[in-house]
Image: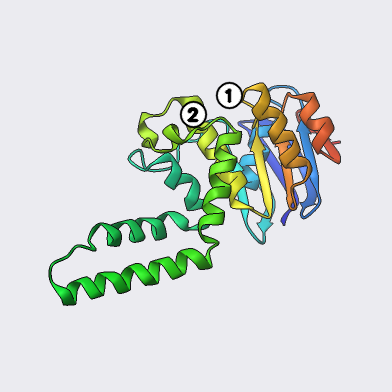
Amino acid sequence: MIAASGIELRAGAQLLLGDASFRVGKGDRVGLVGRNGAGKTTLTRALAGETIPAKGTISSSGTVGYLPQDPSSGNPDELARDRILSARGLHEVVRRMQDASMRMDEPDEAERERIIARYARAEAEFEALGGYAVESEAATIAASVGLPDRVLSQPLGTLSGGQRRRVELARILFSGADVLLLDEPTNHLDADSVRWLRKFLSTYDGGFIVISHDTALLEDTVNKVWHLDANRRE
């Protein structure tokens, strides 16, 4: 859950939001609308902890997934697949399994047994995190937002801006966070992917705030609308 108490947001001297208090938790599906410059992105950044409000407090419990308009996080050398899996801590476990597997032909018997033991520990951790079923879930989400396997096998630094943003969208949706903060999630998606996203959000178990100019997305997924107009939230 995210709770805001008496927050004030500003862009320089301009007041965007004054003395606002609200909560977003399980079952809350909020569409955040308003003209450009009204403070929609500023609000989601504050809720995500990216900026601090001029006044008031923001607190959160549980997990929060945030999709900014221009995501830049992640190591450029990291594979897109590993970036998505990192949302649930799977990427490091998979890496340890792969490293151990590549050394299974170690000629020294004692060292080979240690490698086998390391692989077994990593595999047990992998299975505890959901194993191959969860890895398949991540691949399904990625494909649904337009990321085929060949793209998942590429380093982040080689991807286009649109592909990079879809990787972050897939990662956040895969995370299963208690609250999602989505800033224009349909950007760079084709029609099939947008339809899939509408269905995904309409059945999402947690809460979310979504900024979108896609009226069909809002109509199909949200149960309340917040209208930002400079310094007014309705």
Q: Are marks 2 and 1 in contact (CB under 8 Å)?
A: yes
Say which quarter of the image contains residue 145.
top right
Q: Secondary structure at mark 1?
A: loop
Work out whether mark 2 precedes mark 1 in sequence or the reverse, and give the earlier one: 2
Residue 15 screen position, x and y as percent: 71, 33
Residue 134 screen position, x and y as percent: 56, 54
Residue 211 screen position, x and y as percent: 71, 32
Name which residue type carries label 2: Gln
Query: Residue 188 got which mark?
Result: 1
Residue located at (34% from left, 60% from top) = 96
Q: Secondary structure at mark 2?
A: helix
Name the foreground residue: 170 vs 12. Answer: 170
Name which residue type carries label 1: His
Residue 218 screen position, x and y as percent: 80, 31
Whether residue 200 is situated above or below residue 179 in the rendered picture: above
Q: Is residue 19 left or right of residue 105?
A: right
Q: Report whether residue 61 is seen.
A: yes
Name the foreground residue: 209 vs 192. Answer: 192
Whether residue 72 is situated above or below residue 206 in the rendered picture: above
Q: Quadrant of the N terminus?
A: bottom right
Residue located at (65% from left, 38% from top) = 182
Count of labels shown? 2
Residue located at (65% from left, 29% from top) = 193
Query: Residue 222 got which mark?
Result: none
Q: Is residue 16 left or right of residue 71?
A: right
Q: Quadrant of the C terminus?
A: top right
Dot 2: within a 10 Å radius of its alpha carbon, few (fewer than 14), some, or many (20 or more) residues? many
Dot 1: within a 10 Å radius of its alpha carbon, few (fewer than 14), some, or many (20 or more) residues? some
Q: Which residue is mark 2?
A: 163
